[in-house]
Amino acid sequence: MLYWLYQTTHINIFQYITVRSGIAFFISFILSMYLMPKFIRWAKSKNANQPIYSLAPQTHQAKGKTPTMGGLVIVFSALIAILFCINLTNIFALIGFGVIALFGIIGIKDDISKVVGKNNTSGLSPKSKLLMQLASALVIAYFLYSNTILNQDLYVPFYKHPVLNLGWFSVVFWTLVMVSSSNAVNLTDGLDGLATVPSALSMLTLGVFVYISGHAILSGYLLLPKISGIGEVVIIAAALIGSLVGFLWYNCYPADVFMGDSGSLSLGAFIGYMAIISKNEILLFLIGFVFVLETLSVILQVGSFKTRKKRVFLMAPIHHHFEIKGWAENKIIVRFWIMALISNIIALTALKIR
């Protein structure tokens, strides 16, 4: 809409990605703030509550009546803002829109199954969920490979030259990046607001890289790969950050609503997508440090128990380990936010140290 206004009326201010990103942020933020209390009331009336694992820390049992699927409002608010602000002819923006929609559908299906079954185990089976994620990511990766100018070079942080050309294998690699990122955010979403702030910070950092890579002058000055057209994706990131800030108002400790898979799966997949198009797949380990930490804790726990019949942590993901050790929930959340902030600041130094 705004870009169309620029094309038809020549109101130059609407051609700028920064301007449309700011507008997208505030549209999605206002929509999220307005719709979330209405959704909470509706969810409570329908008993759309978050099922709690029986093995979860005792403090979580009191959260059994907290509404879930707040991710519906996050995604809806963002998509409205995105459609209003992006250039609808930009292929990278349209693919990003598709990433959010496809993974959002998987999350919604999983959340509805849990709510109807009144049990966390009533959702999609881990195998079915993974297969649906892999299929969606594979379609997106192949489309990205076949229909865009995105190259298949692999970059490592703090080094200005590509280290490898992945060729057709990039489709497999990009698929794994999106699925891994999606599941990592999903695993982190276990405490009030824990996944919300690191997700926003990750998209903010990646948004900087995406904007610069899409800018002919800045990308050349900072020695980043120049990829024409990807800057439009910054508007999508801004819209998601806006809806996340609005959601955090109701999701901060003690939460009035949970994100659910409908939010975490699509957010994680989109973070992975941003890393792919900005050629920061490896730097994503640092940008999403909290997500990596949570995922590694689960891998270590499962691997250790299967091979040695011993647990590494009191409970995984690692935020539950600290809960059982006696840390207050809000202390864990804020400390993880601090780690996310520091890791993203360090990641941003890769802009200049190359």
Image (tube, grey):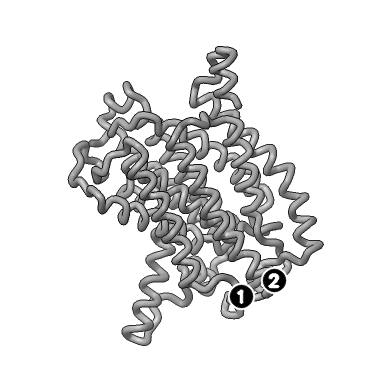
First along the sequence among labels 2 and 1? 2
Q: Residue 122 carries which label?
A: 1
Which image quarter is the C terminus in?
top left
Mark 1: secondary structure: helix
Vertically, is 314 above or below 207? below
| Label pair 2/1, CB-CB below 8 angstroms | yes
Under circle 2, the secondary element is helix
Q: Which of 246 and 14 is in front in this view?
A: 14
Q: Can residue 161 be seen in this view?
A: yes
Which residue in the protein does label 2 denote?
A: 116
Residue 334 seen in the current view: no
Q: x%, y% of residue 322? A: 50, 69
Nearer-the-camera pick, 134 or 55: 134
Given the image, on which type of amino acid does mark 1 rest? Ser
| Amino acid carrying mark 2 in the image | Val
Seen as rendered, the residue at the extreme bottom is 309
Please provide percent x and percent y for residue 58.
62, 76
* Residue 46 shown left or right of residue 182 in the figure: right
- Left or right: 330 in relation to 340: right
